[in-house]
Image (cartoon, rainbow, N blue to C red):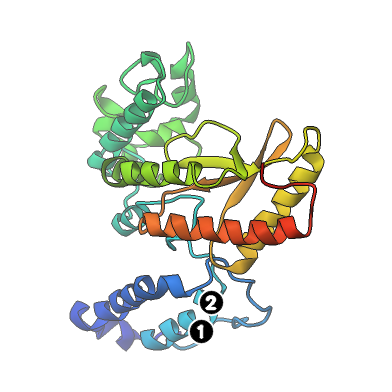
Amino acid sequence: MCSSSHWTSRPSPATRGPCWTDFLAEYYRDIEQFPVRAAGLEPGRLPEAARERCEPMEDILDGVRRDILPSLTHWQSPSFFPANAGDMLSSGLNVMPFTWAASPAAAELEGVVVDWMASLLGLPRRFLFSGGGGGVLQGTTPSTLTAALSTDPEYLKNLGAAGRSAVDYKDWQLALSRRFLAVKIWVVLRARIRRHVASAKWFEAADRRFEVVAPRKLSLVCFRLRPRFPGDDAAVDDVNRRLLAAVIASGRAFMTHFVVNGKFVLRLAVGGSMTELRHVRDVWELLQEKADEVLESCRSITAP
């Protein structure tokens, strides 16, 4: 167990903080050197039991460098393309806006961002947070939802519970706590969305061997290798599976897939906080390289 002196003689923030900040700065500086997705962590690599005594923070971070970082899928890598941004801000602020009083700005921002997204998607006004649909749930009896989930013990009563101008999101879900997720979309829409859309547009037109199977939405491109002859979708699906596996196995980029109209489709979502056009070009070169290898071994699909 940690001794009482550990708590009564804590190091000052000036000496304690840089340990973590330097570690994170080092991680972001060197992140492109890591494989985007590692093979995995060997069983037994991590200690099975917690230590009885406290360890120096430097030793803990050394363990993170040695055992954790090499076995992560690096979501913050500029070559990670399922898309994410703003998560550090959300996690760093670490607020829980389950009631309006718990974090007024977070509660207000969620309503604003819901309206932004509804407008971007062209949804009718009833989907707006300020409309009658409630933003995420549309129905004729929205009060039934909050009546079923609402909990109002004395210690949770606040302006949101008592007034009409504020919302307690704890009444909109089963869990009491709630993360500050709206700030992630808020940051993306304000700071990065145009750049990412431009990168996705470039990617969309880069190589005629690939077909875009659905209209590009913002910075998401859904594509696959073209079939050589009509009716060979099964072979095309198999080749695209192999292509995706080869890209991921390279450790140089990470993408996901989905199935649309029975067709196996690759999806590239440009949304990483550090992703630039050069990274999109890099992943396109990687796709071309791996496509050449796959097509070399499968003659049923070629460039048109």
Mark 1: give few (<14), some (14-19) or many (20+) Cα within 10 Å.
few
Residue at left offset 25%, top offset 24%: 163
Would you place residue 127 above or below residue 223 in this image?
above
Please state which amino acid type lies under the numbered disc 2.
Answer: Pro
Viewed as shown, does residue 299 lie left or right of 52? right
User: Residue under circle 2?
Assistant: 70
Q: Position of residue 69 (x, y in %)?
A: 50, 75
Residue at left offset 60%, top offset 50%: 256
Q: Position of residue 266 (x, y in %)?
A: 61, 46
Would you place residue 153 above or below residue 86 in this image?
above
Mark 2: give few (<14), some (14-19) or many (20+) Cα within 10 Å.
some
Would you place residue 242 above or below residue 184 in this image?
below
Please identify the residue farthest to the front as the structure is shown.
Answer: 304
Helix, strand or loop at mark 1 = helix
The one of 13 and 123 positioned closer to us in this rendering = 123
Helix, strand or loop at mark 2 = helix
> In what quadrant of the picture does the C terminus appear?
top right
User: Residue under circle 1?
Assistant: 66
Would you place residue 207 above or below residue 290 in this image?
above
Is residue 97 something that shows in the picture?
A: no
CB under 8 Å between discs 2 and 1: yes
Residue at left offset 59%, top offset 42%: 223
Residue 76's quadrant in the figure?
bottom left
